[in-house]
Image (cartoon, grey):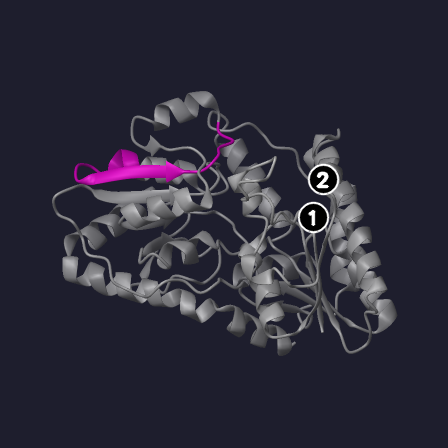
Amino acid sequence: MWYVSQIGRREHYALPAHLHRMGQLGLFATDIWAPWAASSRSLIRSEKLAQRFEATMGEAPVVHRSLIANLFERLSGGDIYRRWTREGAHFGNFAARKFSQADLGPEDSVIGYTAANLEQLTLARKRGAKALHIQVDPGISWYETRRQEQLAHPRAEDLSPMPGAEFLERMGQEWGQADKVIVHSEHSRAALLAQGVDAGRCVVVPPALKPTSAQTARRLDSSRPFRVLFVGNHCLAKGYHVFVDAARQAGDGFEFLSVGSHTMKPSYMEEATKHVTILGSKSQTGVREQMERADVLVFPTLSDGFGLVQLEAMATGLPVIATPCCGEVVKNHVNGLIVPPHDSQAIVSALHELNANAERYEQLSLAASLRPLDYSPAFHFEALLGL
């Protein structure tokens, strides 16, 4: 059996939901589980909280912490890395205790995520179970990339604090306790090997995406501008400034839109509105609506563990323009285009290429819509079994 723990709704609960369908889920531990949040009878109705539940897991073995405990930790003091470390330890102790009570044994597997998995891995070692750890980002190198970009663009974004020793030590201890350290991309694997993780224990297993609607090709609408979409945190590490530079250079015939929260300076965001329609944060439904209205997603990240938004966009038939600094979702000139990081002119050239040939665009769109099938929960689980 599999014992899964996660804070948040990673991959929209694709792995535990699949394990439950297969009868292989021993226990799923999470921070918030809110089947009541969407009910008309609930005292607290929240679309965001309603996403912290997977309907197909209504009868699954699920344990979760109290909403009050989670709220208390989010409001407690300290910088974000101390909070993550403290929250991860509290959650890890909770999950490990529940796994122990559920009689975790040598025939079982334990799997969890960055900074919230140490106690579960330690328990797995003691019980002789398989100890698997998923590192969701490229480790310290991601923070170093962000710092370098912030130093290079001081007018766009303030310097973010670097992780403290306590957070990094916990992350390193998780790597040490795991039988296998799982990353979602070759980009992340190269980063972790450079940080000392043993090559024989560090493996690439892309994340899972729940099945989507039927695959169909998009067609260009020549009666309106070509719609170019960015989805994600508006920050330097995600390459948002590169996206804005591309919007500045693209010329007539293009409409640039972006969805997500931001950490950029207000003066920069005000300037960006001259070239990009900034829509702010949206619900999962709202993001999908914008994807369905768009013609292409641009994902100009400078460093990412994977970038699930690429698959979410392709599930709606959107070709994707991405850098190689993330998961290998885009097949160049098959379902999208690969551009170098930091290169806004390459993005502009890619946009003109997509917009110039309606038949070619339709072919790329169809291939994009098929790509998420390669990341089904069944394939993901088979890859994990191979470990």
The kind of residue on which mark 1 rests is Asp
The percent coordinates of residue 119 (x first, y second) are 81, 56
Asked whether, in this view, residue 349 is left or right of residue 233, the answer is left
Q: Residue at x 83, y 62 (%)?
A: 122
The residue at which mark 1 appears reads as 31
Are the residues flagged by discs 2 and 1 in contact, CB closer than 8 Å? yes
Q: Residue at x 74, y 47 (%)?
A: 65
* Residue 70 - label: 2
Asked whether, in this view, residue 259 is left or right of residue 293, the answer is right
* Residue 222 - label: none
Give the residues drawn in magenta, as a range.
247-264
Q: Of all residues shown, which one is farthest toward the right?
A: 126
In the rendered structure, which disc, 2 or 1, sits on the residue that comes first in sequence? 1
Viewer can see residue 113: no
Q: Between residues 378 and 116, which one lies in front from this camera angle?
A: 378
Q: Give me the C-alpha separation between circle 2 and circle 1.
A: 7 Å
Image position of 40 with respect to 110: above or below: above
Q: Between residues 1 and 343, which one lies in front from this camera angle?
A: 1
Say what secondary structure mark 1 lies in: loop
Say what secondary structure mark 2 lies in: helix
Question: Within the magenta stretch, is there residue 263?
Answer: yes
